């Protein structure tokens, strides 16, 4: 009987550290995008080796294909138009994958300000006009695309290559009123590729 209690005590003592460690692993992981400002090794979350300063390549030793790299952590179902944009061929001044197609990094820069010298990164501050566009055009399309409810999360950190008010218009433009000012957010049917 004493041996039985001794074995139970040993088992409990062995399990306590395991249980404590499992609680720590359930905590939210550190955001690698913000951590890379201070820690070069965070680069290895996406790259197979730490990129050298000044070298430029959209697929610089990435662990996976460009957009697959992002989708390892990010859910494409909550992104407006991700299924329609990624993989499309387009001519733009923004970076494309090695096949000249849109990838996540075409609009987004995974590196926050201060990581790459001379690179400007923009947030997704929602001005009144942008919020109205998202409410009237983007959210209904996204709800239809994923078949569920979606809400704007203005607290979400987003790293854009251009300011929020012109990232979409880099590729999309109004057709009918191209040369005339128009409140474009009210005319979703005028947007095209």
Image (cartoon, rainbow, N blue to C red):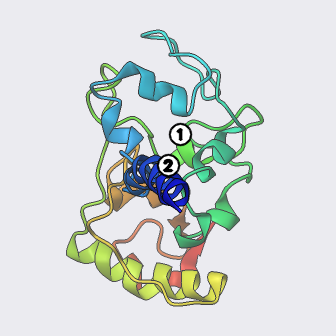
Residue pictured at 42% horizontal, 49% vertical: 13
Whether residue 187 appears in this view of the structure is no
Residue pictured at 56% horizontal, 87% vertical: 143
Point out the frontmost of discs 1 and 2. Answer: 2
Q: Is residue 153 left or right of residue 108?
A: left
What is the x, y in percent for residue 172?
54, 62
* Image mark for residue 13: none
Asked if the residues shown at circle 1 and circle 2 are in contact, with their CB atoms under 8 angstroms apart, the answer is yes
Is residue 71 or residue 105 the one in the foreground?
Answer: 71
Residue pictured at 64% horizontal, 28% vertical: 62
Q: Which residue is mark 1?
A: 94
Q: Is residue 170 above or below residue 55?
A: below
Is residue 93 or residue 62 the one in the foreground?
Answer: 62
Q: How many marks?
A: 2
What is the x, y in percent for residue 75?
57, 63
What is the x, y in percent for residue 47?
58, 26
Label 2: element kind: helix
**Which residue lies most toward the front here?**
1
Instruction: Examine the image and state in which quarter residue 151 appears.
Output: bottom left
Residue pictured at 65% horizontal, 21% vertical: 61
Label 1: element kind: loop
Which quarter of the rendering shows the C terminus? bottom right
**Mark 1 closeness class: few <14, some 14–19, many ≥20 residues within 10 Å:** some
Q: Is residue 164 above or below residue 117?
A: below
Please tell me which of labels 1 and 2 falls first in the chain: 1
Q: Is residue 70 left or right of residue 24?
A: right
Instruction: Examine the image and state in which quarter residue 36 appears.
Output: top left
**Mark 2 closeness class: few <14, some 14–19, many ≥20 residues within 10 Å:** some
The span from disc 1 to disc 2 (Cα, nearest Å) is: 7 Å
* Image mark for residue 107: 2
Q: Is residue 56 above or below residue 153?
A: above
């Amino acid at each position: 009987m004493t041996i039985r209690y001794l074995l139970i005590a040993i088992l409990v003592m062995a399990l306590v550290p395991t249980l404590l460690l499992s609680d720590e692993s359930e905590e939210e992981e550190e955001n690698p995008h913000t951590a890379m400002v201070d820690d070069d090794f965070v680069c290895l979350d996406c790259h197979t080796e730490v990129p050298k300063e000044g070298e430029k390549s959209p697929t610089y030793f990435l662990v996976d294909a460009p957009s697959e790299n992002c989708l390892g952590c990010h859910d494409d179902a909550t992104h407006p138009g991700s299924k329609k944009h990624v993989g499309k061929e387009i001519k733009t001044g923004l970076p494309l994958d090695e096949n000249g197609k849109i990838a996540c990094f075409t609009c987004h820069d995974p590196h926050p300000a201060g990581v790459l010298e001379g690179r400007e990164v923009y947030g997704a501050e929602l001005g009144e006009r942008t919020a109205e566009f998202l409410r009237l055009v983007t959210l209904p399309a996204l709800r239809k695309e994923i078949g569920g409810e979606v809400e704007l999360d203005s607290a979400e950190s987003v790293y854009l290559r251009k300011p929020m008010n012109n990232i979409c218009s880099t590729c999309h433009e109004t057709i009918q009123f191209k040369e005339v000012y128009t409140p474009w957010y009210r005319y979703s049917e005028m947007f095209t590729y």
